Each structure stands twice: as C-alpha cells, then as structure tokens.
Amino acid sequence: MVGDRENKQYLPGIDFPPNLTAYPDLAECLHGARDVLVVVPSHGLRDTLTQIKPLLTADSRICWATKGFELSTGKLPHQVAAEVLGPEFPVAVLSGPTFAKEVGAGLPTAMTIASNDGEFAKALAEAISSDNFRAYTSDDIVGVEVGGAVKNALAIGAGMSDGLGFGANTRIALINRGLVELMRLGVALGARKETFMGLAGMGDLVLTCTDDLSRNRRMGLALAAGKTVEEAQDEIQQVVEGVKAAKAVHDVAEELGIEMPIANQVYRILYEGVAPREAVETLMTRELKPESEQH
C-alpha cells in the first residue's frame, strides 16, 4: 500500500524517501516534470511511452531503466522510443550492476547512464548520484542496452550450471564466453567493443550470474532442480526477464547470423524442452577453436 511508505512485498523494511510521491493518475504525475524516468519491463515500454507522449512538453527529456529487446520486433528500447516519440526529445538509458535491495539499503553502488545528449547524461548523473550511489556516463546507447538485454538470459544458464553442481570452473567459463557472445552481438548492432568491459557489460553480467539476489540466476537454479518455468516463476514471484530475453536474443542473433551457442542453449532449454545436462554436453563437444576467433 502507498500509505505504508515502503514496498512490503519486494523491499520490506526500506522506507521510501520523503520526497517520493505516488500518483494514481499519469497526467498528474507528469505535470510540471521536465525529466521523466520510465521503469517498466521491456514488453511494456512501447505502451507506456505511447501513454506519456501526449503529456510531454517541448523541454521534456526521457530516460528509462528498461532492459531487453522488444519481443515482437527485436528492437532495443531506444529504437522503440524513437518510433513512438520521434527524434525531438533527448533520451537516455540507465543500466549496470544494481540490485534494488542493496541500493535501497544504501550500500555503495555504481551504474551507467548512456545518452545521445551529453548535457542530459551529465545532469542525470548529478541528480541521482549520492555518497553511496555513483553514476558514470556514456554515449554508447546500443552497447549499454545490449549488455542489459543479453545478460539476463546468460544468468539463467549460470544458475542452471551451479544448480547441476558443475562448479566454479564451469561458471567462469560460461560468464567469460557469454561475454564474448554479448560483445559479438553488440558490435554487430553498432556498439563499441570497449563498452562491454564496463559496468553495463561485464559488471552487470558477473553480478547477475553470481548472486542469488538475481531473479534470472534463481530461475536457472530452479530449472536445474527439475522445476518447470511456470513453477519457478511462481516461486520467485517477480518477473524473470531472462525468460523472454532468451527468445528475443535468439531471434535477433538468428536474423543477423550471429553465433551465440550459450544463449542458444538457454533458449533451447526454455522453449524446446532440452534437458540442461544435454545442453551442457552440446556446448562442451563443439568444434575446438582458437579463443580469439570471433565464433
């Protein structure tokens, strides 16, 4: 309940800041606001932007913390925003390794803001940074968004690996080679390779793959224990974006002809009923190649 001044279901014990107000009406919420932050799952971004577009003013600036490809089109969030809002508004994306529980508890955290407008990125970074929260800026929107889109699917794979008892060697191999896949897809979409060595790439991937606060990792653990996707989803009781992300990443990679064997096996487990152990065997018996090779 709003009157409780906390999210008792997902962040119990963490009070809302005094200057945070909830509005039941979208027009009332946006009245007088210049900067608008949208935080919805990727499948709800287009509809949300469509609803807020008539409420924007000439000086509005839009940012989002949405991660993932749009499932029906394979588009990244900034492409969806461009289609809905047009080119006249400065836009930005917030991403990087942040668990809400730790941010809410005031634990030191760093993340990335990517924007096509350097002034907007700097203003956002200054607005949200504090003694315990640090925002870095980037102009590589594609790279930051691809990092956020792919890492959730890979984290399901890491969770399954750990759930099957494959150990630390397997986990780090999945993370490292998963990063290679992430970079391969991102560069093909126009991102800069070095972006994936930063917070929104390697940082977010490692966090999501290795800590049990990650819903995607927990989904993998549950699947390894023999639960169905639906049973795991009911147990986690939050949106596990990696499930839909796995299909979106698979579809985009297939369309572009990008080889992503780990992400593809996660897709096959989720959507084709392949057993996790069989998927690992498939990965381990692939043709041997130089590590530096791009495939």
Image (cartoon, rainbow, N blue to C red):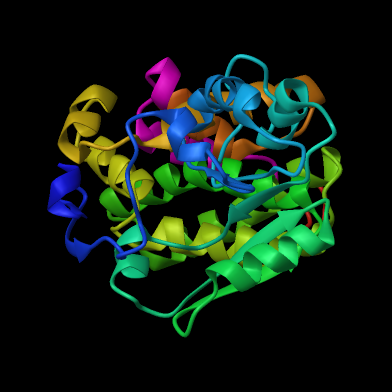
Query: Could you tell me if residue 234 is visible in this image?
Result: yes
In the image: residue 282, left or right of residue 253 = left
Question: Is residue 53 positioned above or below 216 on the image?
Answer: above
Q: Position of residue 221 (x, y in %)?
A: 27, 46
Is the magenta region chiefly helix, strand or loop? helix
* Between 134 and 148, the one nearer to me in the picture: 134
- Residue furthest to the front in view is 32
Q: Residue at x 58, y 55 (%)?
A: 95
Q: Is residue 157 left or right of residue 12?
A: right
Callout count: 0
The magenta stretch is 270-288
Which residue corresponds to the image point at 44% horizontal and 30% vertical from the top-left?
26
Residue 230 found in image quarter: top left
Q: Would you say residue 161 sits in the magenta stretch? A: no
Quadrant the C terminus occupies: top right
Q: Quadrant of the N terminus?
A: top left
Picture layout, residue 182 above or below residue 126: above
Q: Position of residue 5 (x, y in %)?
A: 19, 55
Q: Nearer the viewer, residue 206 or 99?
A: 99
**Picture coordinates of residue 264 (x, y %)?**
57, 31
